[in-house]
Amino acid sequence: MSEQPKVRTTEGVVQGRRRQRHAVFRGIPYAQPPVGALRFAAPAPPHRWEGTRQAVEFGPVVPLSLPIDVPPQGTDWLTLNVGTPDPGAAGLPVLVWIPVGGYLSAASSDPMYDPAALAEAGVVVVTINCRVGAEGFAFLDDVPPNRGLLDQIAALEWVQRNIAAFGGDPGQVTVAGVSAGAGSVAALLTMKSARGLFRRAIAHSVPGLHSTPALARQVTAAFADRLGATAPTAEALRDIDPWHLAAELTSFNAGLHAHRESWGRLTETGTALCPVVDGEVLPETPWPALTGARASGTELLVGHTRDEFRYFSVMSGRYGTFTEEDAHAALELHAPQPEGARAYRAAFPQASPEELVETVYSDALFRMPSQKLAEANAAAGGTSYLFELCWVAPALGGILGACHSLDVPLAFGTLDSPVGTQLIGEEPTPEAVALSRELQEAWVRFVTTGDAGWSAHRPGGHLTRVLDTESKTLPYPEQASRQIWEGHSPAPFDLS
């Protein structure tokens, strides 16, 4: 048992590392480094290699457009990692995790995504790196759009070619993500090039972040002008250092409010560059595609947290400071038109300005896109299992509530990861451990059988698993918001 595990992929042999009850393989390329002539291009097939490639270190992190200091790394960004119960097994279910946040970061090396608990429960776990920010989503005139999504397709194609060699079943693949990763999952549901690459989907906190080509073209042109580029093209940007480009996008995102008159709702997201509904790579947003039978339903586990926006308001220092002016602006920008603002005030007559801001932002950014994805998938003939996490994060005296991303360390069982301890505390309570086990078991059951373990969503019933200290299956808790959004799907951001 001391010999380290080896697996032969279609590109060559990789040698990983044994852990307690599973094996891990890290930094396996699924496409060529997107640099030089390949920069801003669609992903190119990986090179083959002779001999044995050591697969014990994570691949380099893609350039991140976040207000944090991450040193530049190598350029072999398009890699993935595999955690498997047994490379010699066969027919195990597969979970492919897309760790994209805000379409600005994608770090599969984050300890929060450690596959140990899921692998030891019998699941082959694949985590991927893909392009984000300007590298993945700048709308350039001379290259394909939505390159970050094309990277995800390439990774799923690698899984189809190779996962059987790691003990997985290529016919039992579940693609999964949270936040922009869940938005990526939703996009994959509608993309023709993704058909046949996965069987099931898990989407936590689905965002409604898409741009029209008209808006994306104007935003990218403004960004290129900021850089001194002669045009919004790959040719004009190709010689700019990728990490400098990412840092410039961070600054550009921080100044989006200056463009509110022309760019509207997009300026409130902090994300200038996101998937573009270009008509080809991404034909349309998932909600009309599914409800209009232009995409087929699937087995889908989808949900959100109760207090989605709280994390952002606390971390930005705005929590407790929102005014009536802020509430008015939030309702005018994000409530469904034309009567949404009035409907929110009628549905929540006792709400303070702070509560109105939190409600409308949580609804518009995550809760309603998630709930409506469950409805649309069911309308397309799929089976949707809906959940809402209501358990309050213990950290900071409970001020974070049931906030955005709290469900991820619970599902992976990584309560001791940096994000896990930030939200849950250094010493997880018995309630946290029990809830983590419940959500993790739901994931394992779903990726194995397609059944999450509670009643599926039905038209008119809207049954939802409410995850808390004592979890229950109940009618959808956010009925007032659901009724306000009745007949309104999340629409792509457009020029004002």
Image (cartoon, grey):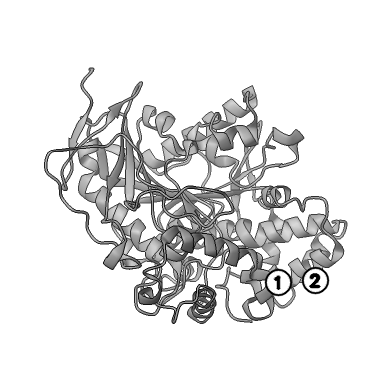
* Element on which disc 2 rests: helix
**Quarter location, residue 358:** bottom right
**Quarter location, residue 469:** top right
Q: For the residues marked 1 and 2, what is the alpha-carbon distance in whole angstroms?
A: 13 Å
Q: Position of residue 146 (x, y in %)?
A: 40, 67
Q: Judge depth for marks 1 and 2 and give the one in front.
A: 1
| Quarter occupied by the N terminus | top left
Q: Name the residue under label 1.
A: 333
Q: Position of residue 480 (x, y in %)?
A: 73, 59
Whether residue 480 is visible, yes or no, is no
Residue in front for this viewpoint, 469 or 12: 12
Residue 204 vertical position relative to residue 323 in the rendered view, above or below: above
User: For the residue marked with disc 1, what is the amino acid?
Assistant: Leu
Q: Looking at the image, which residue is at 70% across and 34% down?
A: 395
| Farthest left residue in view | 50
Q: Mark 2 points at which residue?
A: 342
* Element on which disc 1 rests: helix
User: For the residue marked with disc 2, what is the amino acid?
Assistant: Arg
